[in-house]
Image (spheres, rainbow, N blue to C red):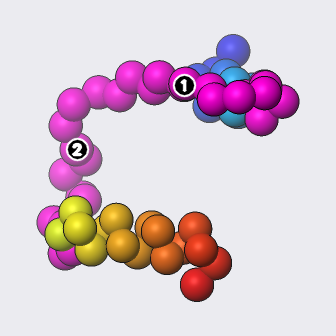
Amino acid sequence: MSEERALKETLAAARDEKGPVFIEIKAAIGAREELGRLTKTPVENKKAFMEHLRGG
């Protein structure tokens, strides 16, 4: 089974659970060379994410 498929199945199963669910995703350290530098601070990212969750 592919990692992407396994993740999709895990997320689908988590939606059906009652109560809190913890999903651990292990990722390799490092970044692709073609990725640019960050342009926003962590606080700006947090605010933008919170606004997105509010639907704005």
Could you say which is closer to the camera, residue 24 or residue 32? 24
Q: Earlier in the sequence, mark 1 or mark 2?
A: 1
Query: Mark 2 sits on what residue?
Result: 31
The residue under the point 19% across, 37% down is 30
- Determine the residue located farthest toward the right in the rendered image: 16
The residue under the point 40% across, 75% down is 48
In the rendered image, the quadrant that contains the N terminus is top right
- Residue 29 relative to residue 24: left or right: left
Query: Mark 1 sits on what residue?
Result: 23
- Residue type of the residue flagged with mark 2: Ala
Question: Residue 45 lies in magenta, yes or no?
Answer: no
Up-down: is 30 above or below 51?
A: above
Q: Position of residue 36 (x, y in %)?
A: 20, 66
Could you say which is closer to the camera, residue 52 or residue 36? 52
- Residue 56 relative to residue 43: left or right: right
**Secondary structure beneath label 1:** loop
The residue under the point 55% across, 24% down is 22
- Residue 31 relative to residue 22: left or right: left
- Residue type of the residue flagged with mark 1: Ile
Range drawn in magenta: 13-40
Q: Quadrant of residue 10?
A: top right
| Dominant secondary structure (helix, strand or loop) of the stretch shown in magenta | loop
In this view of the protein, can residue 7 be seen by the observer? no
